[in-house]
Amino acid sequence: MWEEKKIASFREKLLAWYDAHKRDLPWRRTQDPYKIWISEIMLQQTRVDTVIPYYERFRLVSDDC
């Protein structure tokens, strides 16, 4: 097993990498668990770039309800 210091260092590096390289995705801008869950289901079926327009339409419709 890794020592706590090595784990902490790895965690910091991983989170720094994520902050520098993460994509701006619409489901990351919400705290609504239902919308996040819907995005996960959509993403199981196809690629991210295909899901984004469908998710945006779903979000617009669901915001009206």
Image: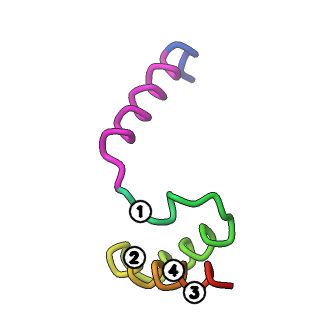
Q: Quadrant of the C terminus?
A: bottom right
Amino acid carrying label 2: it is Ile
Discs 2/3, front: 3
Instruction: Give the residue at mark 4.
Output: 42
Going by the picture, which residue comes out furthest to the front? 64
Q: CA distance from mark 1 to mark 3?
A: 18 Å
The reply to whether dot 2 and dot 1 touch (C-beta < 8 Å) is yes
In magenta, the rendered stretch is 6-23
Q: CA distance from mark 2 to mark 4?
A: 9 Å
Question: Residue 43, how many percent across, how many down?
Answer: 47, 75
Q: CA distance from mark 4 to mark 3?
A: 16 Å
Among numbered discs 2 and 4, the one appearing first in the sequence: 4
Amino acid carrying label 4: it is Met
Q: CA distance from mark 2 to mark 1?
A: 8 Å
Query: Tag 3's secondary structure?
Result: helix
The tag on residue 61 is 3
Q: CA distance from mark 1 to mark 4?
A: 13 Å
Q: Residues within 10 Å of mark 1 (few under 14, many from 20)?
A: few
The colour style of the image is rainbow
Q: Is residue 65 left or right of residue 40?
A: right
Among numbered discs 2 and 3, the one appearing first in the sequence: 2
Determine the residue positioned at 52% across, 20% down.
8
Q: Up-down: is 11 above or below 9?
A: below
Amino acid carrying label 3: it is Val
Secondary structure, magenta segment, majority class: helix
The tag on residue 25 is 1
Amino acid carrying label 1: it is Leu
Q: Residues within 10 Å of mark 4 (few under 14, many from 20)?
A: some
Residue 18 covered by magenta stretch: yes
The reply to whether dot 2 and dot 4 touch (C-beta < 8 Å) is no
